Image (cartoon, rainbow, N blue to C red):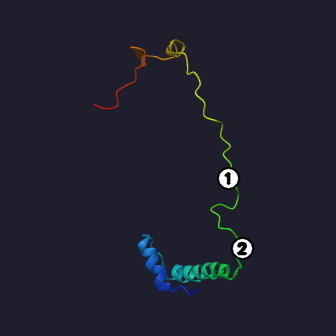
């Protein structure tokens, strides 16, 4: 099954909207065939007794615990705002 034809490469390139030359089709047919041949070697590996896994390394959540904390003091923050109205930051309109 490792043999990929030039026509198959052209078909996939067409689906991906890629323009390739005849030389590139030959080149990629050879390279893709080698990749598939290598992947087929995995079928020969004895996986008896190996538990299925979704990730090779155990994942640990390294984020801090989510705790509510007090926000910025509104009066102090409003001192740094160029324009505000009714306790809210006023920004330029982006819609006409």
Q: Is residue 45 above or below residue 90?
A: below
Q: Is residue 13 left or right of residue 56?
A: left
Q: Is residue 89 left or right of residue 28?
A: left
Q: Under tag 2, what secondary structure?
A: loop
Which residue is under mark 2?
49
User: x, y (%) of residue 80?
Assistant: 52, 16
Q: Which mark is residue 87?
A: none
User: x, y (%) of residue 16?
Assistant: 44, 70
| Proximity of marks 1 and 2: CB atoms separated by less than 8 Å | no
Which residue is under mark 1?
59
Quadrant of the drawing holding the C terminus: top left
Between 20 and 67, the one lying in front of the other is 67
Q: Residue at x 65, y 67 (%)?
A: 52
Residue at the front extreme? Answer: 49
Q: Residue at x 40, y 24 (%)?
A: 91
Residue at the left extreme? Answer: 96
Q: Is residue 42 left or right of residue 15?
A: right
User: x, y (%) of residue 1?
Assistant: 56, 87
Which image quadrant for residue 15? bottom left
Between 60 and 71, the one lying in front of the other is 60
Nearer mark to the viewer, of 1 and 2: 2
Q: Is residue 77 above or below residue 66?
A: above
Q: Under tag 1, what secondary structure?
A: loop
Q: Is residue 18 left or right of residue 94?
A: right
Disc 1 to disc 2, C-alpha distance:
22 Å
Using a 10 Å C-alpha cutoff, classify the residue at mark 2 as few (fewer than 14 neighbours), some (14 to 19) or many (20 or more). Answer: few
User: x, y (%) of residue 26?
Assistant: 54, 84
Which image quadrant for residue 68? top right
Using a 10 Å C-alpha cutoff, classify the residue at mark 1 as few (fewer than 14 neighbours), some (14 to 19) or many (20 or more). Answer: few
Between 10 and 62, the one lying in front of the other is 62
Q: Earlier in the sequence, mark 1 or mark 2?
A: 2
């Amino acid at each position: 099954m490792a043999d990929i034809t030039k026509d198959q490469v052209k078909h996939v390139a067409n689906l991906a909207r890629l323009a390739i030359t005849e030389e590139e089709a030959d080149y990629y047919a050879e390279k893709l065939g080698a990749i598939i041949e290598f992947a087929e070697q995995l079928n020969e590996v004895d996986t008896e007794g190996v538990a299925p896994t979704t990730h090779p390394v155990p994942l640990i959540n390294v984020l801090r615990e989510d705790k509510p904390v007090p926000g910025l003091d509104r009066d102090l923050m409003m001192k740094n705002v160029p324009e505000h109205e009714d306790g809210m930051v006023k920004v330029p309109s982006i819609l006409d």
